[in-house]
Amino acid sequence: MVTTAVASEPPDPSIGVPFSARPATSMGSELTSRLGTSRTAGNWVDSAGRPVVAVTDDEAAAEVRRAGARPKMVRHSMSDLKSATASLRSAPRVAGTSWSLDYKNNQVVVRGDSTVSAADWSRMTEVAKGIGGFVRMERTEGTFTTRLNGAEPILSTAGRCSAGFNVTDGKTDYILTAGHCGPDGSVWFADDRGRQQVGTSLRGSFPGDDYSLVKYDSGRAGKGAEVVSINDREGVRITGVADPEVGQKVFRSGSTTGLREGEVTALNATVNYPEGTVTGLIETSVCAEPGDSGGPMFADGIALGVTSGGSGDCTAGGTTFFQPVTKALTELNVKLIVSKQAGGAAPAPSASQGTASPGSSAPVTGGEVSSLLTRLTDPRNVGPGLLVIAGSLLALVATRWIRSEQERKAYRQYYSATWG
């Protein structure tokens, strides 16, 4: 299951959506913005899909109820939580640590991976104690690493990464991918022999942020450029871009571990990778492994992030962080290339396509992959018919997994030896 950025001239050039247009915001986000950081402490979506807003006083709670959302009274405001993260950021940097805002529990969560020494962890614990009891310390399995290597591979001397989403500045088209994939000037190919050149990296940011552009050699991306693949025959049409919410179900695509799902667990996360610190990331429960870096995260055809890094794997589970697409588009002054249906009638959220790779094109036909995934995984909508479909899909996936596992292991071993 792969991510694809495809190129050639589109039949309709009006495919960019400017991020200067204010993205749609949820009720919870609007309420927290209106009430302010001293009276709220974040918002999320509960298991029933209802917005929840953390509030610090009764008047704010009443306003949230009147708006149709559910308030949750908490002790510490968003100002308190952000002050805590500022204190953590000012402390001596410890590689292998991260912190994020846990809105649901009104806490700041500090995690340390297996590389953090007992002495360093003890020093961070003392910093946390000085901030207050709402800082929660956790050790985690594995290590926080950038997920270099990739989905639909683009390869260079810097490593192997994923093509994420196609974007444009109105004159030239690019691939948006992770910044840690390679420095500016890295030349990328679609094959391991260096014969199918795709483009060149430029305007990247890492550490600090984790995004970069790969300029297509042809200068154009086109037919099929709004589709990201989820396997060798199917893909999802990208119809827009937004910021995610805590509690939102999301999907990620990558060639090492395939299509995976999970939920957003925190926003504005900071990760201290060995290479440097990255801030403002989306924290999720979606698993990822080396080989998934730069690939897209999306929900219902809406672009949300590109894979940065994380810990754990897809056997034991783990945490994965994503660079928000909205910030990358703003900083790079580019627009997301989306389905032309996004500006008019209800968009088709998914598509089927032939096998494609960066620098090639693929036919796109109708389908409903993304919405089908959402319906099948929503327990409120599971009826007898869907249970039969889900059972059949599970049987098919199991059969194909058994047949392909040995090939996948050989694939990983080959590229590990080739690209490091």
Image: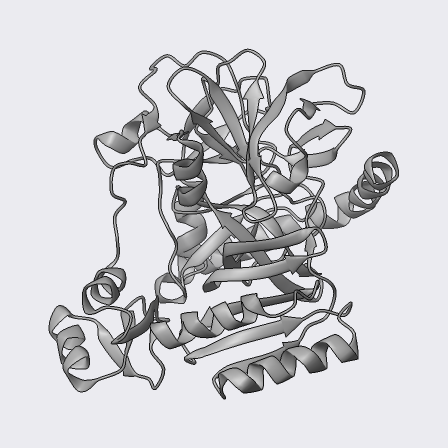
Residue 302 picture location, percent across and down: 38, 43
Residue 416 picture location, percent across and down: 84, 41
Instruction: Give the residue furthest to the left.
Output: 66
Q: How many marks?
A: 0
Q: Is residue 63 left or right of residue 393?
A: left
> Residue drawn at (76%, 70%), measured in percent from left and top?
114
In the picture, the quarter occupied by the N terminus is top right
Q: Quadrant of residue 33?
A: bottom left
Residue 146 picture location, percent across and down: 68, 50
> Residue drawn at (86%, 42%), measured in percent from left and top?
413
Look at the picture and state if 105 lies above or below 155.
Answer: below
Residue 392 visible in the displayed image: no
Q: Quadrant of residue 356?
A: top right
Look at the picture and state if 232 lies above or below 109.
Answer: above
Q: Nearer the viewer, residue 255 or 166?
A: 166
> Residue drawn at (64%, 33%), measured in percent from left and top?
152
